[in-house]
Image (cartoon, coloured by chain):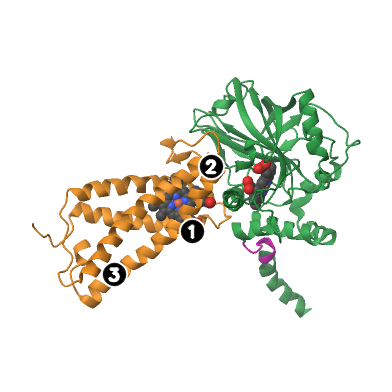
Chain colours: A green, B orange
Amino acid sequence: MKNRYWVLLLAPMVSAAAQEPPKVTAQQFVNLQQGEAAHEGFRRAHAKGICVTGEFRSNGQLATYSEAALFEQGVTPFIGRFSVAGNNPTAPDLKAPVRSLALSFAMSSTEQWRIAMNTPPVMAVKDPHTFYQQIQAIQAGPKAIQAFFAEHPESSDFLSWKAQYQPTGSFAAETYNSINAFYLINSEGNEQAVRWAMQPKVFVPADNLEGVDALHQEITNRVVKEDIVFDWMFTLANEEDDENNPAKAWPDSREQITAGQVVITAVTPQLQGECHGINYDPLVLPTGIEATRDPILRARSAAYAESYRRRAKEALMGELEGQGNE
Amino acid sequence: MSNPHKFSVSMRLFHWAMAALVISMLAAGLLMVRSLEPWQLSILTVHKAFGVVAAVLVIARLVNRLFHEIPALPGDLSSLQKFVAKASHWLLYLLLFAMPISGYLMQYFAGRPIDVFGWFRLPAVLTVDIENYAVFRELHGWLAMALMALVALHVAAALHHHFIRKDKVLRSML
Ligand code: HEM
Ligand code: HEM
């Protein structure tokens, strides 16, 4: 019996340790992402991708919520990038668990916006240090990741999404989520926490896909025939939602506003396109949009900068010579 | 030529204000490139805004210097020591100027406009240039190391004058 009391005494320490994973630096994080042998000149995460260009056609619906110029009715061009998660620029498309879309809007020399979105609507964890452990578990194999999820009840919303998610047969048919929340700020200074998603207009079954570059080839063929269109849909948080917790889904009943359509009109292999030189750091924000205190969101800037610094230096050193993505 | 014993009040103010600013900037820079904590974005934003202030201050300081007589170095210094003293001071000015310029140009070529305390924004390119970004990113890091080394030398020299040579050099800036 006495032993039990001792355990109780230890409980606060144990639980504190469980809640607070060891802190990692941006350099350690990027080292883990890039793995043993870095692919020089490429992103340390989402290394494989393809540049896209197109425009956002705003319907003006969001202009009362945010001062950002692109939400006024009108058209703003972008340089974007479809990608798959992972550090290998030649990995097979269909093996990647996550697909992504990034957009860069250069509205003017003083107003720019970078966005990087993934297929899951939520993270499995809510801080970067636990995310580091999750990646370690993924690298260690299925047993480790199962154990990880068992120890992290906050993963439940992510796991229920994962259970029902069916990868489609095209980059054009996926839904891409901001995951992290941001504040829209209007000209009166009112702030509204939002998340957003790019919603596809087509359904493409995953049947006829083949080859290492299946998704890249599919999108290259598709865009010749038709524009690739997404509805840009914003979900407004209410007082019950914690905008700083990226692992918690918001109820479906929340107000949603479609701000317009993102239309992709051309794609280019990444080494030939302009997207390769861009750091899609989601904390490059225009007036009218601000970052929440979400610890995952706040961790992204330093990590992206470290990855960008490494690959920029390698690009400068001419490491890219003779390497190709296609 | 008159030889004041002390630096003018304005020069002393500039000196200590910039010393505090630059040491904070170095510390902030070194912390923020490593940290994944939620305050990283806040420090980064402040680093960039105060970096712009530093650029303005160093120009104002150099202009101010043109209008003021400065105390001569102690007569018993060898000409080599005098040369090193003067050269290190000009090198400090150069680095104090090159730090914010390289910081700004790195952000400029990465297409990241700089928000200065919400008052105004400095422009960035519309088409990112990753190679030029790399040049100025690496330069900013190297110059920061050179600046830290030079500041350490500068402080050591000041203390050497005060405690070992027991001359008026350190007091002329107090
Ligand atoms: C702490 C959390 C995260 C870390 C440390 C992290 C780290 C990184 C790094 C280092 C890169 C490469 C950057 C570059 O070299 O340009 C990257 C790219 C990317 N990340 Fe994250 N990431 C995090 C969370 C997220 C989340 C929540 C999302 C989605 C909402 C996301 C979506 C993306 C996408 C789409 C790209 C590729 C962007 C492109 O095409 O250039 N990341 N991430
Ligand atoms: C007196 C002026 C300045 C000093 C002493 C200073 C110092 C530093 C230091 C020590 C670092 C870390 C470098 C490294 O680890 O390689 C740094 C990083 C940085 N500085 Fe400055 N800086 C100054 C001005 C500026 C200005 C004016 C800007 C931009 C407007 C700027 C933008 C940055 C950025 C963005 C980083 C981080 C880069 C990254 O994460 O890759 N700095 N700075």
Q: Can residue A239 be seen in this view?
A: no
Q: Magenta segment range?
A: A17-23
Residue A126: in magenta span: no
**Mark 3 or mark 2: which comes first in sequence?**
2
SS category of the residue bearing label 1: helix
The reply to whether the residue tagged 1 has its Cβ within 8 angstroms of ligand 2 is yes
Image coordinates of residue A163 in percent, x first then y, are: 85, 45
Same subunit, tags 3 and 2: yes
Q: Which of B165 and A133 is in front in this view?
A: B165
User: Marks 1 and 2, how far apart in space?
Assistant: 20 Å
Residue at numbered disc 1: B30
Same subunit, tags 1 and 3: yes
Residue at numbered disc 2: B110
Image coordinates of residue B161 in percent, x first then y, are: 24, 72
Q: Which residue lies furthest to the front in this view?
A: A322
Amino acid identity at mark 3: Ala
Residue at point 31% right, 65% down? Answer: B154
Q: How many other residues sit within 10 Å of disc 2, few (<14), some (14-19) or many (≥20)?
A: many
Residue at point 35% right, 50% down? Answer: B97
Horizontal placement of B48 versus B94: left or right? right
SS category of the residue bearing label 3: helix
Amino acid identity at mark 2: Ala
Q: Nearer the viewer, residue B84 or B57?
A: B84
User: Marks 3 and 2, how far apart in space?
Assistant: 39 Å
Pinpoint the chain carrying mark 1. B
Which is more foreground, mark 1 or mark 3? 3
Pinpoint the chain carrying mark 2. B
Image coordinates of residue A149 in percent, x first then y, are: 79, 56
**Mark 1 or mark 3: which comes first in sequence?**
1
Residue B157's mark?
A: 3
Q: Which residue lies furthest to the left in this view?
A: B1
Horizontal placement of A106 versus A21: left or right? left
